[in-house]
Image: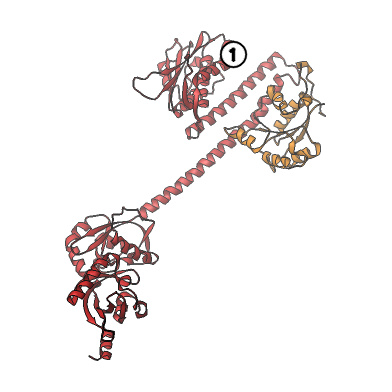
Amino acid sequence: MRARILIIEDNAANLELIRYLLESSGYEALVATDGLEGVALARREMPDLVLCDLQMPQLDGYGVLKQLRADPICHGLPIVAVTAFSMRGDEERVLTAGFDGYLSKPIDPEIFITQIEVFLPAGLRVRHDSPTGRREPSDHG
Amino acid sequence: MKPEAAALVLGVLPDAVIVWTTLGNVVHWSDGARSVFGYATSEAVDRSIVELIVPDDQADEHHRMVNETIVNGGAICESVRRRKDGSLVYVDVSVKKFVDADTGELRILSVEKDVTHIKVLRDSKLMDARFRDLLESTPDGIVMANPTGYIVLANTQAEKLFGYTEGELRGKPVDMLLPERYRHAHVGHRSQYFLQPRKRAMGSGLDLSGLRKDGTEFPIEISLSPLHTEESAFVLSAIRDISERKQIQKELQDSNAELARANLAKDHFLANMSHELRTPLNAIIGFTGTLLMKLPGPLTEEQDKQLRTVQNSGKHLLALINDLLDVTKIESGKVELNRELVDCNAIVEEVAATLRPQAESKGLELLLTVPIMPLLLHTDRRALSQIVINLTSNAIKFSDYGHVHLTLKQHTASDNAAKTVEIAIADTGIGISDEDQAKLFGAFSRVNTSRQKAPEGTGLGLHLSQKLAHALGGKVVCRSELGKGSTFVVAVPEI
């Protein structure tokens, strides 16, 4: 069984990058382009992990965190902030707010998957035993 | 004189006529007594004369006078009394004893004439002759008042300050220089002050205001000092108009607030700028990475080479953004130093371990000389580590063969100066000319042409290292000779 990962990101290029990396590694990507849509999708789809941008229109990453943590069903979802806020103190601020993890942009595509897999249960991780075992991304995830 | 006639005379007399018993209880209180001391007859009769009008410091004198009257039949003296409102009055007192016809008891009759105003004018003349010239020579306004609160002398500066003409303040109550709301409290303060006079410095009081003749108020600072003469005790008030200083203070506060706002706006701007620059870099570095990982498909050798150039340039831009933000933070004093006990051996060893692969890939040897006992120093771990990383990776970058040698030691100063740690990074590179050494630590300063070939430098590394060293109370120095390699030494003291 492969994990379903929700990406909440308002920048189209960055959304595409993360989606591509996840799907290339064999994960199913769900996408939302703003916080409100992200919260609604999380409630409906119950993903295994949420990767969430911080600065977004309407509802920012902290708002998403607050709503999901208050949700009777989604409150236990692992939520990782993926953000271009990376000045001294930003990581601490993010973790203090209650995010499970913090990844700064620009992400390093070579280690990104390893970084996010930390937040997935072992049974949901895709095995990458050899480089050739990697799947090509498909349009339908 | 018939009793009715006597009552009539007592009624029209402006002076206070008071009768009390040998125990001091008031039995008669005339209309004159009411106007001099402020108590109505009904308020005064049956109360103790001492409690009513004798100031605390005059009690002994009062008892002496009463005793003298009982022994000798009468006494005459000048005295100070306290009015109902707390203010003091000067009185000429004439006391006689007599036997009450009805009860046969001994009584004291006192006739007390208010001479406050006469005394003020007399004191004023004396003080004017004695102190005027002296008081005119000070820049502050000076007002001299007697214990009853009347002005005996005011210098020209004081008259100008409060908007009065020459001599106009003499004999006036000092209270009129204060706004109405302070006056009541002032009477009490003044009477208290004469009981325990002491010098009070300028500005030791609260925010005070003066009242000009035209009714306007202005901020003042007052210092009080007691002045004892043969005639009386006075209080000398030096008064300074501090409108201008208050104005400057306010302007300073305003501009400080403005500065704080501007600083906050700048921090906000920097955070946003960093965020906005990183966002597109994420896609540039990210997709270059996926292409180089060959996730979409195989690459030709030329495509691979060109993509690596894009990747390096992207990473260079990122390094530049990071360094620029660091420099800006240090320059605006925003760098937060976290003082802790740092194991300098560990720092140097960690840096060496991190950068050794880089050195070895160029065929360079990375050598390490550290003391056997760990060298401990109170400083900021992160800043010191960053300086050593910068200097060491520079050394690797600019050496094509030979070695890079890190040496850690405690600096041995001749005197008992604070403990200083030195980390020297020596390379066998091409060296730097004296001329170039002079501009080495400037931002974006590139020295001789052969150094330009290193593409990954931001031009801010040495600049940043020097700024960080300064923030730690230390410095980075360079010793180099063209063709003979360079040694950069960072020296930081205990902080």
Could you classify mark 1 by the number of other residues whose Cα lies within 10 Å: few (under 14), some (14-19), or many (20 or more)? some
Which quadrant of the figure has residue B68?
Answer: bottom left
Front residue of B391/B147: it is: B147
Which residue is depicted at the point 19% across and 60% down? B131
Residue B32, position as x, y percentages in the image = 29, 80
Q: Quadrant of the C terminus of chain B?
A: top left
Residue B178, position as x, y percentages in the image = 35, 64
Chain letter of the red region: B
Which residue is depicted at the point 29% across and 74% down? B23
Residue B166, position as x, y percentages in the image = 24, 66
Front residue of B268/B455: it is: B268
Residue B483, position as x, y percentages in the image = 45, 10
Q: Determine whether the residue tagged by mark 1 lies in a helix, strand or loop.
A: helix
Which residue is depicted at the point 18% across and 62% down? B230
Residue B44 left/right relative to A10: left
Chain letter of the orange region: A
Residue B208 higher or lower than B291, as above or below: below
Front residue of A86/B455: it is: A86
Mark 1 highlights which residue? Answer: B357
Q: Quadrant of the N terminus of chain B?
A: bottom left
- Farthest-out residue, front: B104
Which residue is depicted at the point 49% across and 43% down? B260
